[in-house]
Amino acid sequence: RKASSGSLMTGASTPNRRTDFCQHPGWQQLNIMRESAQKLGVEDPFFRVHEGCSGATAIIDGRECINFASYNYLGLSGDPRVIAAAQQAAAKYGTSVSASRMVSGERPIHRELEQALAQVYQADDALAFVSGHATNVTVIGYLMGSRDLVLHDEYIHNSSLMGSQLSGARRMAFRHNDLNHLEKLLQQNRHQFERVLIVVEGLYSMDGDAPDLAGLIELKETHECWLMVDEAHALGVLGEKGLGSHEHAGIDPNRVDIWMGTLSKNLSGCGGYIAGCQPLIDMLRHFAPGFLYSVGMPASVAAAAIESLRIMHAEPERVRALQKNSEYLAVQAKAAGFDVGESIGRAVVPVISGSSLVATRQSVELLKQGINVQPILYPAVPEKSARLRFFVCSEHTEAQIDFTLEALLLQRKAS
Ligand code: PMP
């Protein structure tokens, strides 16, 4: 029995069975990737193992590196106060709430987190989900239907794409940050659909650039659409106090219909949230499948997020340090002749080489010098914009950034 199920799993003795996973296009794609990496002699830069807590530095292969590959922008994951809050909550509530919140998983700490998040957007209420990715999938998937249209920026995160596909709505992409294109699509299509949802990100995770929020609000008001802004990389990053896109743009947050965010960046945990008006939140609380049919967030995760948010409000100097560091990296890299695209110098700074091979080699070589930065390759971005992507932290020092730039320059000279 063992032997036969083993051969089914590997497909070793039955390579042409339709149930063989080796026949799946995903497996074939993976093999092509591995074979071409081997031929080109490049190491796999992914799944590097970090020991301990990663922020401005990380321990990789037993060696301390300067780290530009974590979302720990404000250095709060690992902050003793955040760890203590998580430990206390785990001691009080256990490590799992062991049920969907509607059934018997609700804990006071869930509502405390949601109220703190709602305040960031001056919203009626908020709802926390167990995953950021699942938040976009389930919320867009639930809200939109076959008579509706989702209009999203072409660089929108995979989770919003998945949600749009799940919803059964028509889906159209407008050119990145191009409001003229969006307007054209609205003029041509708005009248054919019942509801229209525009989805954008507050800070784009690949390019570190931001949309024209005021312009988007004007368009969505004119054409009677909903506007959803994914603040995954904007909370704690944009605006003087780190409140995100609305503070950065000087906009009343109530003019955006759906604020989405994640706990996995500056809130030191994992999970997602939606903030907005009461009918929206009540509806999602009762009907969004990814909330209703999924376990409630562990109390320790909620506690870590509450404490991180409290520290973010109490210590705005962290936000300022993050902004100063990322601006420094973007400005210096540009001055040295690197292509940083349209990055506004806030947390995410790409260095675009336009070749997956070059970006991979850069990443592997930098690690040898004690610098950890990930390459972003096709198909995550078009091949012509393959890049290194730097996630900057408030805890980075100018000396670490200078050292990194020097290493990049030396690499360029050597190539
Ligand atoms: N939205 C954006 C813009 C993201 O970059 C990500 C992932 N980093 C997500 C949503 C999903 O969030 P999470 O990783 O917390 O599931």
Image (cartoon, helix red, strand yellow):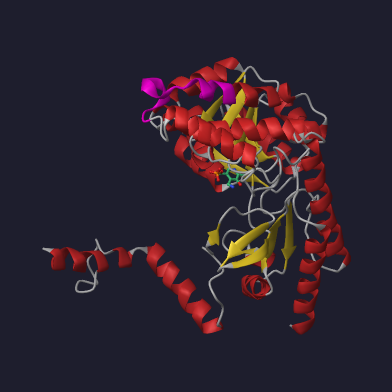
**Percent of width and height locating residue 334:** 85, 63
Q: Is residue 355 left or right of residue 105?
A: right
Q: Which residue is at 79% across, 52% downward?
A: 326
Locate residue 66: give its quadrant. Answer: bottom right
Overall secondary structure of the magenta section: helix
Locate residue 84: give its quadrant. Answer: top right
| Residue 188 sits inside the magenta stretch | no
Q: Is residue 370 left or right of residue 394?
A: left
Q: Quadrant of ligand 1?
A: top right
> Magenta segment range?
98-113
Residue 257 vs 156, above or below: the answer is above
Quarter of the image that includes the C terminus: bottom right
Q: Is residue 371 left or right of residue 127?
A: right
Q: Inspect this view and state whether residue 139 appears.
A: no
Residue 194 vs 185, above or below: the answer is above
Q: Inspect this view and state whether residue 38 appears.
A: yes
Quarter of the image that includes the N terminus: bottom left
